[in-house]
Amino acid sequence: MAYGFTYYTPTKVVFGFGAADRVGELVRQQGCKSVLLHYGSQSARRSGLLDRVEAALRAEGVRFVSLGGVVPNPRLSLVYEGIELARRENVDFILAVGGGSVIDSSKAIAYGLANEGDVWDFYEHTRKPTACFPVGAVLTIAASGSEMSNSSVITKEEGGMKRSYNDDLARPKFAVMDPELTLTLPDYQTACGCADIMMHTMERYFTNGGNMAVTDAIAEGLLRTVMDCAVKLRDDPQDRDARAEVMWAGSLSHNGLTGCGNDGGDFSTHALEHEIGGMFDVAHGAGLTAVWGSWARYVYQNCLPRFVSFAVRVMGVDPAGKTDEAVALEGIQALEAFFRSIGLPTSFAGLGLAPTEEQLRHLAASCAVASGGQKGSARVLREEDMYQIYKMAL
Amino acid sequence: MAYGFTYYTPTKVVFGFGAADRVGELVRQQGCKSVLLHYGSQSARRSGLLDRVEAALRAEGVRFVSLGGVVPNPRLSLVYEGIELARRENVDFILAVGGGSVIDSSKAIAYGLANEGDVWDFYEHTRKPTACFPVGAVLTIAASGSEMSNSSVITKEEGGMKRSYNDDLARPKFAVMDPELTLTLPDYQTACGCADIMMHTMERYFTNGGNMAVTDAIAEGLLRTVMDCAVKLRDDPQDRDARAEVMWAGSLSHNGLTGCGNDGGDFSTHALEHEIGGMFDVAHGAGLTAVWGSWARYVYQNCLPRFVSFAVRVMGVDPAGKTDEAVALEGIQALEAFFRSIGLPTSFAGLGLAPTEEQLRHLAASCAVASGGQKGSARVLREEDMYQIYKMAL
């Protein structure tokens, strides 16, 4: 039985090699007067992209101020700085030039500008924003899907708390997707991006809350395509077609499409990773693959039909003469082997980490708090379950 | 190589059994004061749906005037009537309750309200609208995809001219999709809807202008799902899951998703059908299946790789030991057999029509004019090609 859902993806996508040159026109169409140009490291400057974007804004007569310095697992302190700067400069539009971290930081600034009080409240879920300033994105990394999604993840340095807030208010007005910009990404980051993209679809796939055949067909096709392209990019990072496929798949994977009718999804792996990212500052995609296999083995018996479908239709497991349980486990193993084949970890050890018993307990406790006590659909996890999964992932 | 594209689907979808009850809240969120409630036949009244919608509007304190009478191949005369009524009543929102014809008629009224002069000009492509009044939809037929699409097709009675106009301005603000409303559709209309849905994806699939693997995977998965559900609904019109799948697939098939990176698509079959619909007033889906096989046989050699992919991945043709040409033809035959298996025609004769030579020439001439001289990507068709295809379809 298909469950009810809301699907809302208002972001205007302008996709293609060379699309970055259209950012000026897109900002002008927003009718804004003063832009906060938000970005990450100096690589955006060195590559010439920032110069291009700035020239495009000037050509359209759009005033702007710049704020760089966003890091992976973007920090609350920079969000505060951005809000203050944007208020001072009467900014009415936030233009993110970067990957998920920059877009998420931009969304947080946009919430902060439109609402009184501490923006962290929204990420702690103690109150809700009533509005959000408009955000646009020039995407440089295919991974987070934040360019079309309603989600934003911010890390509060104090206590290493990585928290997410999802609200349609923050869906970007436009997203410029120019695969050219991703040709120079380091291999590890490319692989991490592919894993993150896959996980956004898989989080929506492994549920006990019903599903729709058309959504499954889309999800499975997307996963197969991303896996194929991840291997192509491992072998040839300059494969332009594969860069384009992965970039578009990244947006579709997290804009809601792959979860329509699937009752909200599971999202436990993301919750488990957020704690690892908050404590150890690892790459998000690698944190996800480090813990996914342990999560899957812990929950699969509770969600067997979905793990069997996944094994057969995505991982190509031949089910002939095997029990469902064997098929499911073979699928899990196959995906872990795939992750390793593109250079990603499938354990804490693979991340170069050896958390202490105390740290594992802390991760589980924090994950439970952040999840409001429990998380998941494939299997509902509580603090002790989370601890067991972290322990299995050592 | 993937081609550039723009993807813009701002329509908020509220999907699910019982979703129709949410229309009042959605209209209120639009902040409008006076609604034109536009619908088709009295079946919407008899079923109780109109009463429900009216009660929902009243409950939200929204004023409305009603205009029914939309017919399949919706008429320009009623559009004029709607514009006049809506102007007189200071309408600021058009709510379509019905299928594609009602939504298309609503879009035409919305263009007419927002622009001076004759609204038919837009459908004749002699000038472009600069604005469009907001439209929302309560969908009762899964077929046209108009509830999320930018397109609208209107027939001018004088001369039987069926013309389309596509513009993002007219994308509905919201679409309420309640599969419950489709449970009582006649079998023939259900089958026609499935064919129309399939064709919206196939028109985008058969191109020579490049393609993206992730788009293909989505398109092929959607086609397989709709075919599967069409058979289920032939055997059991009350299959609620299948009704839901088809309804959602219908929107995804025509909102742009299945064409991303595919260079605009072909759309010759639609152009060919529009003339048949204009002259003989047949059901749109049946008109499409009546002419598709002839179109496919006429063009496939010019677009062989795509016809081979379609045959293998959608129709399940085993390519072992066969030439590409044989595989492509087997795929075409298999789809025609499928259409017939759900009660749809694959020729003019199947439609109960025997057009004269003069009528065939007229259809081709009119199709060429409506297409601006030529049409298509799988193979570019001119008037003589169109005539040949019509003749093959006798």
Image (cartoon, coloured by chain):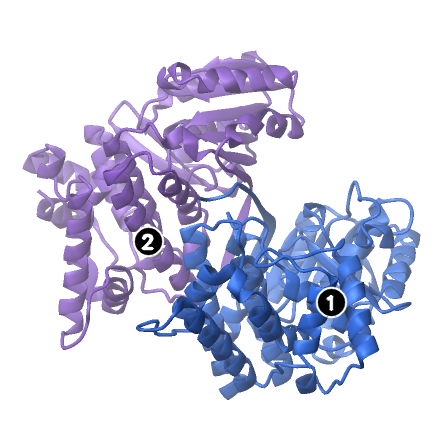
Chain colours: A purple, B blue
Nearer the camera: disc 2 or disc 1: 1
Pointer 2 local density, CA inside 10 Å: few below 14, some 14–19, many at least 20: many
A340 w.r.t. B176: above or below: above
Quadrant the C terminus of chain A occupies: top left
- Left or right: where does residue A329 sit relative to residue A251? left
Give me the disc on residue A27: none
What kind of element bears circle 2?
A: helix
Name the spot of residue B47 as percent of width and height, x first.
Answer: 70, 79
Q: Which residue is drawn at 48% across and 74% down?
A: B329
What kind of element bears circle 1?
A: helix
Q: What type is the residue that disc 2 sits on?
A: Leu
Q: Residue at x 42, y 63 (%)?
A: B309
- A189 and B379: which is toward the camera: B379
- Left or right: where does residue B158 sit relative to residue B58? right
Name the spot of residue A82 as percent of width and height, x first.
Answer: 46, 18
Residue named by callout 2? A223
Residue named by callout 1? B274
Asked if one can make out residue A50 in the rendered structure from this viewpoint, the answer is: yes
Q: Residue at x 33, y 48 (%)?
A: A226
User: Which quarter of the picture shows residue B176?
Assistant: bottom right
- B321 and A352: which is toward the camera: B321
- Left or right: where does residue B173 sit relative to residue A12? right
Q: Residue at x 75, y 72 (%)?
A: B277
Label 1: chain letter? B
Asked if one can make out residue B98 in the rendered structure from this viewpoint, the answer is: no
- Left or right: where does residue B245 sit relative to residue A288? right
Label 2: chain letter? A
B88 w.r.t. A130: above or below: below
Q: What type is the residue that disc 1 sits on?
A: His
User: Which quarter of the picture shows residue A162?
Assistant: top left
- Give the distance between the C-alpha atoms of the residues marked 2 and 1, in whole angstroms: 37 Å
